[in-house]
Image (cartoon, coloured by chain):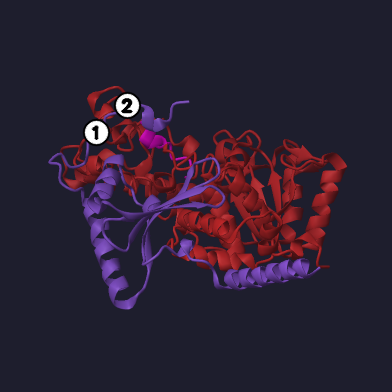
């Protein structure tokens, strides 16, 4: 089945001179502010891309302006999520998809490491307990 | 009793279904996005929900087309939909439930009794009061009686769709069944209107989720719609807005302007007077929304959208108005504008929209049926 994006429709960009659209410049300014905050206070933040009225051209412009960085991560939980570090350090483009591959959330996270990648403290403790149990069971089996 | 399904927390339900913490954070991030909360709230919301009890939800369908339920069940695709059903305990929905007849009605009575004062009542469809309520009956009870009975023990009522919220198509002139929105029947309960024909799936689930997370009725606008979803007009958030501001309009559906993706204002788009989240949340898993597909907004989430004249008349067109209203052209004259320029037309339309809205509210209040 062809998708909407496959149907060739020419959409005229809001700015004809090839410069950045007003919306894209505003987002970039916001990112600068959030990066400065992260650098000085260590506070992470995020921008919800789906809440912004952006044309496909605006998106492409924003992606080009931020560039691709070194780290790419894939998260497989209730569907695939793609996490891409941008060329600007501390900026992560995160796409969450469900099991059907539909985009359910898209955000720009400004942080050292995206929060969803870090392991949770209680799960780490539970994991340590489970691993200790596994070792004990293994040792018991060897002595039998 | 710990095994009682209402006593099971959301976290326990998720564990039983093998859904990981990251999977749930992802869902909450998507939900936070739908609720226009800062996306950084996703993990915090997940934490709060994991310890929450699942509220009982009773879904009543009256004079409706089931389009709203179709929309509801398409929220975030089936996997996430199953999550939604982990978060609430849907105890009665005559379309979705396996039980039928007396067994279904018994299940509803039981859920209402056990959760009296705590359950969330969802209403889909308008309520006909003509012929003693006889236009819509189930199990020998009229819709109006069922609603009054079910409303007594509800913590809050969520009206899903324009019919339950504002009467919708059944309420449209000449309203042969004397249909009413829920607000015309029930007066003493918190009522949240989630309008739209149908509403956006994520707006329905987002409203429910917000209620479950906070236990409170969200901030509502003057039509009792959650402000997080209905705080902006389609026009305010439309990606074609720059063309409107530049005065670039499509004049027909197949002209150069339409092909260039210019503003659909002159083709009857009701975006400037319609409050909804279509331009940002979009439809079908965020694929697009009517304007992105080349068609103007019909204004389906506004009261009486069906009686407002042609969907294809511009908001500035005097033919769109009815006798007794100040014509938008007169407003234009007052504004001293000779040309049809975006900003001025917008202001004129907004003024007419407000006048009309006021009159319709008046109509609703004046004709409210007695009792309930």
Q: Chain B is drawn in which colour?
A: red
Which residue is more in the foreground, A82 or B367? A82
Magenta residue check for B159: no
Indicate the quadrant containing the C terminus of chain A: top left, top right, bottom left or bottom right.
bottom right
The chain holding disc 1 is B
Q: At which x and y percent is residue A13?
A: 22, 38
Residue B212, image x, y percentages: 61, 62
Considering every residue shown, the one lying at the far left of the view is A17
Magenta stretch: give its range. Answer: B290-302
Task: Look at mark 2 in the image and give the residue it sits on.
Answer: A8
Chain letter, colour purple in render: A
Can you see residue A78?
yes
Does the residue at mark 1 contact the one at mark 2 (Cβ under 8 Å)? no
Q: In this view, does B282 lie to the left or right of A13?
A: right
Element at label 1: loop
Looking at the rendered structure, the secondary structure element under dot 2 is loop
Provide residue B307's location: percent of width, then percent of height: 48, 36
Q: Residue at x 62, y 68 (%)?
A: A127
Q: Residue furthest top?
A: B254
Name the chain letter of the residue that bears numbered label 2: A
Labelled disc at residue A80: none
Q: Tell me, yes or no, whether dots 1 and 2 are on the same chain.
A: no
Which residue is rendered at x = 23% and y = 61% of the image?
A29
**Side of A12 relative to A122 (left or right):** left
**For the residues marked 1 and 2, what is the alpha-carbon distance in whole angstroms?**
21 Å
Asked if residue B322 can be seen in this view, the reply is no
In this view of the protein, which residue sits in the foreground, B356 or B70? Answer: B70
State whether the magenta stretch is mostly helix, strand or loop: loop
Residue B249: which disc? 1
Tell me the crowding category of disc 2: few under 14, some 14 to 19, or many 20 or more residues within 10 angstroms, Cα based: few
């Amino acid at each position: 089945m062809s998708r909407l994006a496959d149907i060739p429709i020419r959409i005229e960009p809001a700015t004809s001179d090839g410069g950045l659209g007003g919306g894209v410049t505003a987002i970039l300014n916001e990112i600068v502010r959030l990066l400065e905050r992260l650098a000085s206070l260590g506070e992470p933040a995020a921008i919800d891309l789906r809440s912004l009225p952006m044309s496909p051209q605006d998106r492409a412009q924003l992606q080009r302006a931020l560039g691709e960085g070194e780290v790419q991560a894939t998260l497989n939980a209730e569907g695939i999520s793609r996490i891409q570090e941008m060329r600007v350090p501390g900026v992560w483009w995160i796409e969450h998809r469900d099991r059907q591959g539909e985009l359910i959330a898209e955000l720009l996270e400004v942080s050292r490491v995206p929060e969803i990648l870090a392991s949770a403290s209680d799960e780490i403790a539970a994991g340590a307990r489970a691993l200790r149990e596994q070792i004990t069971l293994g040792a018991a089996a060897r002595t039998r | 009793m710990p095994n009682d399904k209402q006593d099971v927390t959301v976290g326990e339900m998720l564990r039983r279904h093998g859904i990981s913490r990251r999977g749930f954070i992802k869902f909450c991030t998507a939900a936070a996005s739908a609720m226009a909360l800062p996306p950084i709230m996703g993990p915090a919301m997940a934490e709060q929900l994991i310890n929450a009890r699942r509220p009982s939800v009773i879904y009543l369908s009256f004079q409706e087309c089931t389009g709203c339920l179709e929309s509801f069940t398409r929220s975030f695709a089936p996997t996430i939909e199953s999550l939604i059903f982990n978060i609430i305990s849907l105890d009665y929905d005559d379309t979705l439930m396996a039980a039928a007849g007396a067994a279904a009605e018994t299940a509803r009575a039981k859920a209402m009794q056990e959760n009296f004062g705590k359950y969330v009542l969802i209403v889909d469809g308008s309520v006909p009061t003509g012929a003693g309520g006889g236009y819509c009956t189930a199990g020998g009870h009229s819709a109006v009686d069922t609603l009054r009975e079910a409303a007594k023990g509800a913590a809050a009522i969520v009206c899903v769709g324009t019919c339950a919220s504002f009467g919708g198509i059944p309420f449209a002139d000449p309203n042969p069944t004397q249909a009413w929105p829920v607000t015309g029947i029930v007066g003493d309960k918190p009522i949240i209107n989630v309008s739209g024909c149908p509403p956006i799936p994520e707006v329905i689930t987002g409203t429910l989720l917000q209620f479950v997370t906070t236990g409170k009725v969200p901030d509502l606008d003057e039509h009792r719609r959650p402000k997080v979803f209905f705080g902006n007009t389609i026009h305010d958030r439309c990606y074609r807005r720059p063309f409107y501001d530049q005065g670039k309009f499509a004049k027909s559906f197949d002209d150069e302007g339409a092909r260039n993706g210019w503003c659909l204002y002159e083709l009857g788009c009701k975006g400037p007077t319609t409050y909804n989240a279509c331009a940002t949340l979009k439809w079908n898993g965020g694929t697009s929304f009517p304007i992105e597909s080349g068609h103007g907004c019909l204004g389906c989430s506004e009261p009486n959208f069906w009686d407002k004249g042609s969907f294809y008349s511009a908001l500035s067109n005097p033919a769109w108005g009815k006798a007794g209203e100040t014509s938008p052209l007169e407003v234009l004259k007052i504004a001293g504008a000779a040309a049809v320029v975006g900003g001025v037309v917008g202001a004129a339309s907004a003024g007419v929209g407000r006048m009309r809205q006021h009159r319709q509210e008046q109509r609703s209040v004046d004709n409210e049926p007695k009792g309930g």
